[in-house]
Image: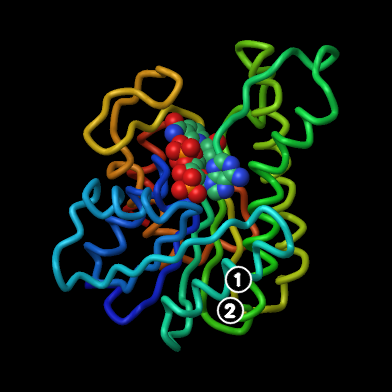
Amino acid sequence: MPFQGKTVVVVGATGVVGSGICRAFLDQGAFVVGVSRSAQKLEELKKTISVKPGEAFATAVGDFKDDTTSGRAMAAIDTALAGRPIDHVISSQGFVKFGPPPTQSTSAQLHDALDDGLTVNFQAAKALLPAIKQRPASFTMVSGGLAHMPPPDPAMWMGTLKNAAVNAFTYGLAAETARDHVRVNTVCIHFGVAPIGGKQNQFGLAADRDTKGLAPAFLAIARGKQKGQVICLNGWADVDTLAKS
Ligand SMILES: NC(=O)c1ccc[n+]([C@@H]2O[C@H](COP(=O)([O-])OP(=O)(O)OC[C@H]3O[C@@H](n4cnc5c(N)ncnc54)[C@H](OP(=O)(O)O)[C@@H]3O)[C@@H](O)[C@H]2O)c1
């Protein structure tokens, strides 16, 4: 079991992508801390990913929306860790906010979209990265292929902005950690991913595989050598290639 004895924190654990990641690291023997803003969603997650009695899954309720809530979230994670050092963090927070086209949106809508995608990753990095900088650890964020193109519908333009912002933030963290041991990367997913057992993602895009099919990409990055990269997955073949690396 490659991740036996390793500790993994998954922020956004209840999400489509995060849930598959939790299951995959548990299957590989890791101690997993799933983080969500909702205790109820964490209870539902245990059923969704079939956490077995005795399996090394702990939960922490927390919200990485601002400096104050982030401090509380980190305290909850520390309690769940019970002194274990962290080996890997995956921050898979937020999805895509829909709204009016750019010239018809308000500043509040713009800030909201960035808060739910960029700020939450920024806060997770501030809270979780310093302690693992000098460890052979990884910190992985998640974005989407909308970052690289005009969105198919103008209502999705804030998704383009948020994903591009997360990708750009990767490079900011990469510069800060260039001389450290920790490896910061972002997985930029260019296709639909379904929830466990599903056939389409949240906005009805057909998905060839569910999140358990995507998770091997995150296992590969955690055990791999990638550092400071935005890793674009253009299709499922890229997941398979990464998983074999
Ligand atoms: N699913 C896809 O088809 C797909 C495709 C390409 C890229 N992606 C990217 O993958 C990442 C995760 O997507 P996903 O499909 O897993 O989304 P999701 O199912 O909506 O999950 C995201 C999780 O983020 C957490 N979260 C924490 N703070 C949040 C906030 N302020 N606002 C909203 N959510 C917050 C939520 O957990 P709690 O409510 O429990 O706190 C939620 O479960 C995103 O960057 C997305 O763009 C997804």
Alpha-carbon span between mark 2 and mark 1: 7 Å
17 versus 144 height, above or below: below
Q: At label 1, which amino acid type do we have?
A: Leu
Question: Which mark identifies residue 132?
Answer: 2
Label 2 crowd (10 A; few <14 / some 14-19 / many >=20)? many
Which percent across, then down, holds residue 130?
67, 77
Q: Within 10 Å of the Cα at label 1, are there few (<14), some (14-19), or many (20+) other Cα atoms? A: some
Residue occupying the far left of the picture: 53
* Residue at 85% over, 13% down: 103
Q: Is mark 2 within 8 Å of ligand 1?
A: no
Q: Residue 7: percent from the left, percent from the top?
A: 39, 75
Point out which mark residue 190 bears: none
For numbered disc 1, what is the local secondary structure? helix
Q: Which percent across, then down, holds residue 198?
A: 26, 29
Residue bearing mark 1:
128
Residue type highlighted by circle 2: Ile
Q: Is residue 222 above or below residue 143?
A: below
Percent position (x, y) of residue 170? Answer: 68, 54
Q: Is residue 242 left or right of residue 95?
A: left
Does residue 171 sit above or below 214 in this rendering? below
Residue under the point 41% across and 43% down: 17
Which residue appears at 64% of the width and 42% of the height? 117
Q: Quadrant of residue 194?
A: top left
